[in-house]
Amino acid sequence: MNIFFGPPHVGVQILVDRTPTDLCGINGPYAVALTYSSRPPPNSQPQAVNIHTSAPWPDTIGSFEQLAIGLNAVVRTGRADTVNATLAAG
C-alpha cells in the first residue's frame, strides 16, 4: 500500500509478504566420532577412548512460513490522476 502525503510525489509504502514453503529431503545416517584421553583412577594412566556410532535419521518432511513486513520510502513520477510510475526503496 502506498500512502502519499503533502507533496504529491513523495510518500511511504507499507509492505506485507507471506510465503509458505514445503520442505522434503532424504537424510543420511547421523554419525558421531569422538576421541578423547581419560585418566581413570586409581593410577591416572592416560587411556585413549574412541567412540563411533551411527543412527538412522528420518527424512525431512514439513513446511514453514515466512512473514516479511516493511516500511519503505516511495517516489511517484507523473500526475496522480493519470498513468504514473513509482519507485520504492527501504
Image (cartoon, rainbow, N blue to C red):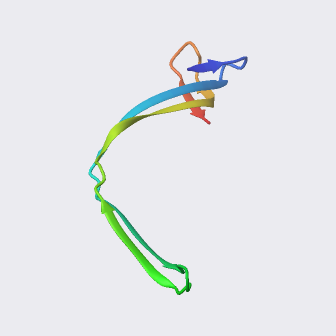
Q: Is residue 9 left or right of residue 29?
A: right
Q: Is residue 39 left or right of residue 9?
A: left
Which corner quadrant of the image does residue 71 belong to?
top right
**Residue 35 seen from this side:** yes
Which corner quadrant of the image does residue 29 belong to?
bottom left
Question: Residue reaching furthest right?
Answer: 6
Seen in the picture, residue 58 relative to 12 is either above or below; the reply is: below
- In front: 61, or 33? 33
- In front: 64, or 29? 29
Image coordinates of residue 69 in percent, x first then y, are 56, 30
Image coordinates of residue 63 in percent, x first then y, are 36, 36
- In front: 90, or 28? 28
Seen in the picture, residue 24 relative to 9 is either above or below; the reply is: below
Seen in the picture, residue 72 relative to 1 is either above or below; the reply is: below
Image coordinates of residue 57 in percent, x first then y, are 31, 53
The residue depicted at 51 percent of the width and 78 percent of the height is 38
Q: Give the quadrant of the N terminus.
A: top right
Q: Give the quadrant of the C terminus.
A: top right
Question: Residue reaching furthest top?
Answer: 81
Image coordinates of residue 51 in percent, x first then y, are 39, 72
**Residue 23 seen from this side:** no
Q: Is residue 77 left or right of residue 55?
A: right
**Number of marks present in the image shown:** 0
The residue depicted at 58 percent of the width and 32 percent of the height is 88
Question: Residue reaching furthest front?
Answer: 42
- In front: 78, or 71? 71
